[in-house]
Image (cartoon, grey):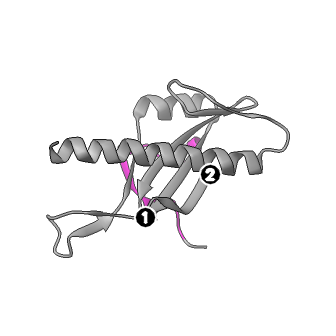
Amino acid sequence: MTGTAESNKRAHHNGEIGEDEAMKLLVERSKQHAVKRVNGLLDFVIGHTWVEVKTCQIQIIDYSRKDKHRNGRFILDINQHSALQKQDGLYMFVVLKDGELFKHRLMRARDLEYRNNLTWTTVIRDE
């Protein structure tokens, strides 16, 4: 398997973990509406609110850097972002460390200017 194939497989697996963790967090937060997982452009719907989950690792290996590591990044999709903005939807950003939930943030898509990728530290800041 090539480096890219391995990276894509790992990203897919991390995305599944992120969605599972997001489901738990969303169920805890949503007392009035059921959280439904959907297989489409977006991941979840709570009542009438759409939610897209974005997952990354706390750090990844980057051989182009002197220290060989960099912070993980969330990859955004313009079609998802547009749909979320039109529906006043939410992003659930999930950061994993060693395959476990490390940090998360739920935010309105309208509060986020679209960029293709975002370093997790720009989205989730320590209060």
Q: Amino acid at mark 1?
A: Asp
Q: For residue 12, what is the image quadrant?
A: top left
Residue farthest to the top, as pictured? 40
Residue 123 among magenta residues = yes
Viewport quadrant of the N terminus: top left
Residue farthest to the right, as pictured? 32
**Residue 113 in picture, x, y percent from top left:** 47, 46
Mark carried by residue 98: 1
From where the camera sits, is residue 111 visible? no
- Residue toward you, 4 or 112: 4
Residue 46 among magenta residues = no
Residue at (51% x, 48% y) in the render: 18
Q: Which residues are magenta?
A: 106-125
Whether residue 125 sits left or right of residue 45 in the image: it is left
The residues bearing labels 1 and 2 have C-alpha atoms spaced at a distance of 21 Å
Residue position for label 2: 106
From where the camera sits, is residue 57 visible? yes
Q: Nearer the viewer, mark 1 or mark 2?
A: 1
- Residue toward you, 51 or 38: 38
Residue at (75% x, 51% y) in the render: 28
- Residue toward you, 125 or 57: 57
